[in-house]
Image: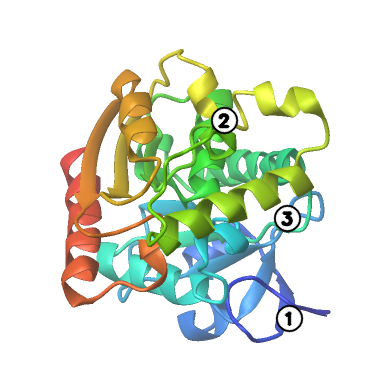
């Protein structure tokens, strides 16, 4: 069965497989990345991206992509995840959830998939301490919620431009020439108005983590652009976490969609160091 996906412009066919076959691939790593992988009929599919060396896959990044209308990375996630696998030398399993669903349904789909992956990886001797949850934009917000619900202190997290507050609905002072942040606010407002079903959802810490000041017990790397209008919210929020911070100079919320050579190296080198430091 073929389906449109959010990772690139091509149609993808479903391939039914399991974690053992992914860790020990029987077809080329290039070919397997061309499929939506169905691990279980009760969870959403995943996409798999291999590092250069597949002889010893003992570290895994579970990636939750952002909402394309906000991150502006639509059709770029396949490239981003491929680079992430190559640059970190880790297996990347990206959750291929349906962006068109309501936000909390997307979160629930990603949570169920992350729990399933964690349990299945444990069966092939990849423990939580070798698993990293990573996401960008609203995908990073989902990672925060999943990390909080799973409550596994050995899981690591990497958050790229997380959306932590509801301040997109505030009367923010934005320079009239700052198109990036004006578009960001507009895109967030449109998304939440369409994808939050009830008024109470706007008070839910799983939607806006800033509303919950309880410490999230996980080791985290937070990456953001220094021109993201929600920079102060992010920095204030992560004070309650055991986090390291990388600020990308002259970058806004959507920097991931189009990084130059310098930013690319800074971004992936810092992620690689973070992963190595806490093994």
Which quadrant of the rendered structure holds the C terminus?
Answer: top left
Which quadrant of the rendered structure holds the N terminus?
Answer: bottom right
Find the residue positioned furthest to the front.
Answer: 176
Which residue is pictured at 30% across the width and 32% down the height?
235
Q: Is residue 17 left or right of residue 126?
A: right
Label 1 Cα neighbours within 10 Å, binned few <14 / some 14-19 / many ≥20: some
Q: Residue 226 at x, y = what percent?
A: 25, 49
The mark closer to the camera, 2 or 1, is 2
Residue 239 position by quadrant: top left
Q: Is residue 233 visible?
A: yes
**Which residue corresponds to mark 1?**
13
Find the residue positioned furthest to the top.
Answer: 214
Disc 2 and disc 3: Cα gap in Å?
A: 24 Å
The mark closer to the camera, 2 or 3, is 2
Q: Residue 72 at x, y = what percent?
A: 52, 67
Which callout, 3 or 1, points at the residue further toward the start of the chain? Answer: 1
**Which residue corresponds to mark 2?**
208
Provide the secondary structure element on which disc 3 rests.
loop
Q: Which mark is residue 44?
A: 3
Disc 2 and disc 1: Cα gap in Å?
A: 35 Å
Label 2 Cα neighbours within 10 Å, binned few <14 / some 14-19 / many ≥20: many
Which residue is pictured at 52% across the width and 40% down the height?
141
Q: Is residue 279 visible?
A: no
Q: Residue 181 at x, y = what percent?
A: 44, 54
């Amino acid at each position: 069965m073929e389906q449109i996906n959010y990772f690139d412009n091509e149609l993808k066919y479903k391939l039914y497989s399991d974690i053992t076959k992914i860790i020990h691939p029987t077809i080329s790593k290039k070919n397997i990345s061309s499929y939506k992988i169905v691990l279980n009929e009760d969870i959403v599919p995943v996409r798999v991206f291999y590092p250069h060396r597949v002889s010893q896959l003992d570290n895994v990044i579970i990636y939750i992509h952002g909402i394309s209308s906000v991150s502006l990375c639509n059709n770029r996630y396949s490239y981003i995840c491929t680079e992430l696998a190559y640059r970190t030398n880790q297996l990347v399993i990206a959750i291929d959830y349906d962006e068109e669903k309501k936000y909390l349904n997307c979160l629930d789909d990603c949570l169920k998939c992350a729990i399933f992956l964690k349990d299945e990886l444990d069966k092939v001797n990849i423990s939580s301490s070798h698993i990293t949850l990573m996401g960008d934009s609203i995908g990073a917000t989902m990672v925060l919620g999943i990390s909080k619900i799973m409550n596994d202190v050995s899981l690591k997290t990497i958050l790229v431009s997380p959306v932590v507050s509801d301040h997109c609905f505030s009367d923010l002072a934005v320079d009239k020439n700052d198109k990036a942040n004006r578009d960001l606010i507009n895109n967030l407002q449109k998304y939440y108005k369409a994808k939050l079903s009830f008024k109470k959802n706007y008070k839910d810490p799983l939607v806006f983590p800033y509303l919950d000041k309880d410490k999230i017990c996980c080791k985290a790397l937070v990456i953001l652009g220094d021109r993201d209008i929600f920079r102060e919210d992010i920095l204030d929020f992560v004070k309650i976490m055991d986090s390291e911070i990388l600020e990308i100079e002259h970058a806004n919320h959507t920097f991931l969609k189009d990084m130059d050579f310098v930013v690319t190296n800074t971004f992936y080198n810092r992620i690689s160091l973070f992963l190595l430091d806490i093994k």
